[in-house]
Amino acid sequence: MFTKQQILEALQKVIHPEKGKDIVSLGMVGSINVSDSGISLTIVPERSNDPLIGSVKSLIVKTLKEALGPEAVISDIEVKPRVVVEKAAIKSIGNLPGIKNIIAVSSGKGGVGKTTVAVNLSIALARKNLRTGLLDADVFGPSVPKMFDAGSYRPEVIRRDNTDFIVPLEKWGVKVLSTGFFVDPSEAVIWRGPMASNFLKQLMTQGDWGVLDYLIVDLPPGTSDIHLTLVQEVAVTGAIVVTTPQQVAVADAVKGIAMFRSEKIDVPVIGLVENMSWFTPAELPGNKYYIFGRDGGKNLALESGVALLGQIPLVQGICETSDSGKPVALEDSVTGMAFMSLAGEVVKQTEMRNRDLKPTEKVRMNKPG
């Protein structure tokens, strides 16, 4: 069994990302208990809304495993802040003043290229001289930092009007915040639902977004607490559903459209994006191979009465540029122009939505009892 001294010495290697000092010297380590069920400890941040506390907890787990060996079991890390920031202080900025349109990008299932669409759409909007932000709400699998070649970015926290704000990354004209900026990319994010939802709230309401024409929100695949958190916290202007032509993906996209259109959510679906519509080899740019089926997304758009915002071809360059941190929307290639066209359609459909429909309201879930 490990001693408290061993654990404390290991914790001296955990550096707070913002303060640059170890958590022991910062006085952030409270009680330490060792039992048959594992190691439990208490950490004491300065304030309850410290946006980096999730990153600190991940670093604690990683450091203790490295220092004490794989047999070290961390059973609990309790957070007891010195100062509790009242929720009302956060709620007062919850409407995200200065942001004209909030567009949620979703998919019924994973693997359809939702994040690729969200990233390239954001860059394409910025290239059209629109003030654009991107919020990576895929809390458990954030891949936006890799696509922006910003895996090492750690946001600064500034204080203004007695409120802490998180400074987004600014690159290619897009302001970006992601869970991936706060956790080690080699570590899995293991959070319970409420913790993930609260962290997303902080990124939304305490992000130093400034004035934006569009805030694109990259949601996790499927439906989850994260989707509910988004629509409860802010008034979402509209949703985009991403699918491939494959029937399995189309069937799940139907569920995604139905979720946003449900009576409780009631967020307009401004359109559907069919990704990987056909494969075009680099050496034969004029050829199209429909390897996932043909027009599945296009037909669903017709059946559902939503706009088909675009059909994005599958080309090797999309994968290569995403992995290298240089999204294809930066290029004037055929695919780059496809995303520029997509951005134009998103602007068109959003303007029509704002002209013809009443503003979206935040969802208020009735509590039982």
Image (tube, grey):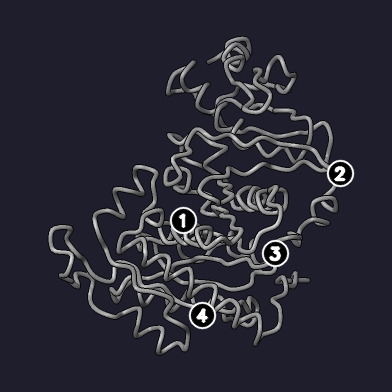
Badge 2 amino acid: Asp
Mark 4 nearby-residue class (10 Å; few <14, some 14–19, many ≥20): some
- In the image, 132 versus 111, the foreground residue is 132
Determine whether 258 is above or below 38 in the image.
below
Mark 2 nearby-residue class (10 Å; few <14, some 14–19, many ≥20): few
Residue 297 image position (x, y, % from top left): 35, 78
Q: Nearer the viewer, mark 3 or mark 1?
A: 1
Q: Residue 174: which disc?
A: none
Q: Quadrant of residue 75?
A: top right
Residue 364 image position (x, y, % from top left): 74, 71
Q: Are marks 1 and 4 in contact (CB under 8 Å)?
A: no
Q: Residue sitting at 71 percent across and 14 percent down?
A: 25
Q: Nearer the viewer, mark 1 or mark 4?
A: 1
- In the image, 127 versus 175, the foreground residue is 127
Q: Nearer the viewer, mark 2 or mark 4?
A: 2
Position of 96 with respect to 294 (left or right) is right
Q: Residue 258: which disc?
A: 4
Closer to the N terminus: mark 1 or mark 4? 1
Position of 47 with respect to 311 (left or right) is right
Classify the position of the C terminus by image quarter: bottom right
Q: Residue sitting at 47 percent across and 48 percent down?
A: 144
Residue at numbered disc 2: 161
Residue at numbered disc 3: 234
Badge 3 amino acid: Val
- In the image, 24 versus 202, the foreground residue is 202
* Secondary structure category for the residue under label 3: loop
Q: Are marks 1 and 2 in contact (CB under 8 Å)?
A: no
Q: Nearer the viewer, mark 3 or mark 2?
A: 2
| Separation of marks 2 and 4 at Cα, in angstroms | 41 Å
